[in-house]
Every structure is written in C-alpha cells, then in structure tokens.
Image (cartoon, rainbow, N blue to C red):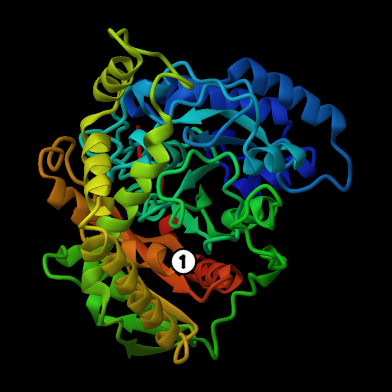
Amino acid sequence: MPEPSTLTVAAASAALAAGELSSLALTEALLARIAAVEPTVRAFLTLTAEQALADARAADASRRADSGPLHGVPLAIKDVICTDGVRTTCGSAILATFVPPYDATVVSRLKAAGAISLGKLNCDEFAMGSSTETSAYQITRNPWDPERVPGGSSGGSAAAVAASMVPGSLGTDTGGSIRQPAALCGVSGLKPTYGRVSRFGLVAYGSSLDQIGPLAWTAEDLAIMLQVIAGQDPRDGTSAPVPVPDYRAALSGELRGLRIGVPGEYFVEGMEPGVEQATREAIAVLRAQGAEVVEVSLPHTRYALPTYYIIAPAEASANLARFDGVRYGPREAGASMWDEIELTRGRRFGAEVRRRIMLGTYALSAGYYDAYYKRAQQVRTLIKRDFEQAFTQVDVIAAPTSPTVAFKVGQKLDDPIAMYLSDVCTLPINLAGVPSLVVPCGFSEGLPVGLQLIGRPFAEATLLRVGDAYQRLTDWHTRRPVL
C-alpha cells in the first residue's frame, strides 16, 4: 500500500472498508505528515490532534459493512466555518478568542457521516483576499514552491491537500476562493451552485455570493464529499429544495454527445502563455474523447470585476458590522462604548478588510446607492443572462481558472488592483450563482495550472463527470510536490 498520507479520499475510503488500514493508523500518519511539513507550509491555525485520534478510535470501533465512504476519513475545515468547541478565527485578530457553541451544518453532516476533523485551516481574513497573505496569524506557503502563495482565500485548504497533510478539506468560494487556490496548488476544487450547500454556520462575507465546497485530489473525491454536505437545510433560507443526485454514480467516463463551450472573453490580456497553452491542451483532450467543442460568447465578462467589487464589499460592510468587540472576541479599552468599538474595529481588522468595508459603506451610502450598488446589481443580471444564453447552446463551459500561476509572496500585496485581477476568471461564476469545478491540467514554469469547468445551475454531476473523465485520461492529479 502507498504511504497512507498520500492516499486520495476514495483510496483511503476503500482501504478502510477493506480492513487494509485503520482510521487510527491513517490519522496517525497524517498527523506525522503535518508535524513534518507544517513548519514550512503553515496551513493550520488550529490542530485538533487529540480529538482526531479519539474520533479515529471511535470510527474503527463503530465501522459496519454499510458504513459510508467518509467513515473514518480525516479532513480539515477552513477557519470561517463554525466548529463546536473549536476556535474559529476567520483569520482575524478580532475573533482571536471566539469559540462557537455549535457546528455549521456542513460540519455536523461530515460528523454524521463518520468523517474526522484534524482542525481548522488558514485563510485570508474573513475570506477577503487571493493569496492567504491577509490572515492576521501567518502566511500559508505553496507546497510546490514555499516562496510563492497558495492562492486564496482558501489557501490553507488547498495547501493542506497539496502537501498531503489531509486528503480532503472544506473551503469557501465568494469570488474564486476555492477554485483559484486549487489551481495554484495543483488540486481539485468545486464551487457548488449557490444554494446547493447550506451556509448555516459560515461566517458571512458576501451573503449572495458565498458558497461552501470541497477540495481534494480528484473529481471522484469531490463527488464523495459533496454527496454528504449537499442538500436543503431548514436553518438556511437560501439553501435550495433541489434533490441531491448520486454524484459518484454519475462518473461514467463518457463524454460523447457533450457540448463544451469555450469563451474567448476568458483568455484575457496578460494571461501567461503557459497557462493558456495548458488550458487549451486540456480542452483538446476532452475533444479527442468525443466531446464537441464550440466557441461561445459571454460578452459582459469584462464588467464582472468592477461589479463584484461593489456588491461583495457592500455585503461585507453589512455582515461585518456585528464584529465590534461587544459580542465577539477581544475588546480594546476606550473612554466610552463608542470609543471601544471604534478602537476595536480599527486595530483588529486588517488593512484589506478595512478597505472593503469602506468601499462597501461608500457604495451603500445616501446619494451613491443608485449610482453604484443598484447599477452593479443590474449588470449582475446581464452577466447571469450571458450564462443562461450560453447554456442553451452547450452543456459545459471550459476556461482558465487564473491568468497566472502562483506568484511570489509579497509580489501583489501592496497593489490591490493587481491582486483583484487574480480572480478575473472566477468572479463571474459567483455573480451568476452557477457551479464550477477546477481540476489540475498541467504546469507552467514548473507550477500547477487548473482547468475550470462551469455548468448549469445544480448540474454539479455533469461537471464532476467531465472532470473525472479528464482525470482518467491524464495524470496531473497524481503529481505531488516534494517538501
């Protein structure tokens, strides 16, 4: 058997079911791997080793013939998702001492499925960033090159998988925060349709954009994890009453008859040649396997970035108003209550979070609401219609994930516009609310590149089928960085 820490979710599940490996042995192997590489990668903010070992023993003792595929499989959780009794900081100093008294729905569903949590993963503060450099605690490093970023905001979730510290993880995606780090770290990641996965227990950034999703090595792994976390939740009014199909059963490997659209607008000016080449070669693989590839147009794509950076900060301005030092986290001392609130927010929010709060507050302010927020929502409708029109012609859209490979730590930190442009290929998907899958598709300058597959609302099964078929034909998802 391969080294247990290198197993995919599916392989670990099969080994556990066959009795070739115990959950305790797998958990111990992963904790040993974490001890060896975490000082370099720095993906974890909280490691729950003792609880994980206890849960592993319990999983071994309770295993039955009909135990589900996640029974006894260790995973890890992005630190913007609430975990009962385990610190949840959102990567922010303002929540340094916050311990939730309940689990998010996705966490409770993973626990019910027998999964084990190894802890909480680093992220950009309140999920605001594209490099995991805005965390108040540490900078996570890309396992392929520790001098480079892992992407963001779910950088810890992607890096932990890429470094073989955990076979799968949960992240969140508001404008590309699962898909961009998945691409930059050479792993697979899925942003489900808005409403497919409950957001109850997710600390909100942009409530009309946020979605929780899985990261792992393969599309099959993502199918296993999505099966558990998907479905309507009465505690989340935005979760959709849509049946959850058998995602793993959809992985037929068959692409014949499928129409794949390629939007020219996504091959943006300034895209690195190696990224474009790897993406186009991946699309050629799908064509060779029987898919029909056609050109499509998404004409309002160029408006997605300014639209997003009005809507998302506006929602963040409202959502983050609750963090004032009165109800959550530590409080700065001041002469009055208002002084304390001002000092707490001013000192404990990082620069990027303050920037977005100010942008959003301005966009919502009297006299500017119609000029900015209302107009942005109108453009959002046009972007959504672009996708609706495209999906009358094709089943799936294939595009780049990021215009570049992973960039150097610090390279874009002082240039917010350059940083925001990192998500130019992922933002439209969140504005439209459609699902999107990223799978590794090659390397450029020795660094991973990801192929982005975009689908109709609630058509995750189709995306996973295409991603799995591609991975049956290629070996990019089997490459592991040397640490």
Residue type marked 1: Gly
Q: Where is residue 93, by image quadrant?
A: top left
Quadrant into which the C terminus falls: top left
Looking at the picture, tell me which residue is in the foreground, 144 or 246.
246
What residue is pinned by disc 1?
A: 433
Please provide percent x and percent y for residue 124: 33, 36
* Residue farthest right in this picture: 65
Residue at point 18% right, 48% down?
419
Total residue callouts: 1
Q: Where is residue 347, by image quadrant?
A: top left
Residue at point 59% right, 18% down?
49
Please provide percent x and percent y for residue 8: 57, 46
Q: Residues within 10 Å of mark 1 (few under 14, many from 20)?
A: many
Please provide percent x and percent y for residue 338: 31, 19
Residue at point 70% right, 38% down?
108
Asked if residue 426 shows in the view, the reply is no
Please provide percent x and percent y for residue 41: 35, 29
Q: Is residue 384 left or right of residue 327?
A: left
Q: Is residue 212 left or right of residue 445?
A: right
SS at mark 1? loop
Asked if residue 167 shows in the view, the reply is yes
Looking at the picture, tell me which residue is in the foreground, 388 or 234.
234
Looking at the picture, tell me which residue is in the foreground, 363 or 22.
363
Quadrant into which the N terminus falls: top right
Above/below status of 233 relative to 437: above
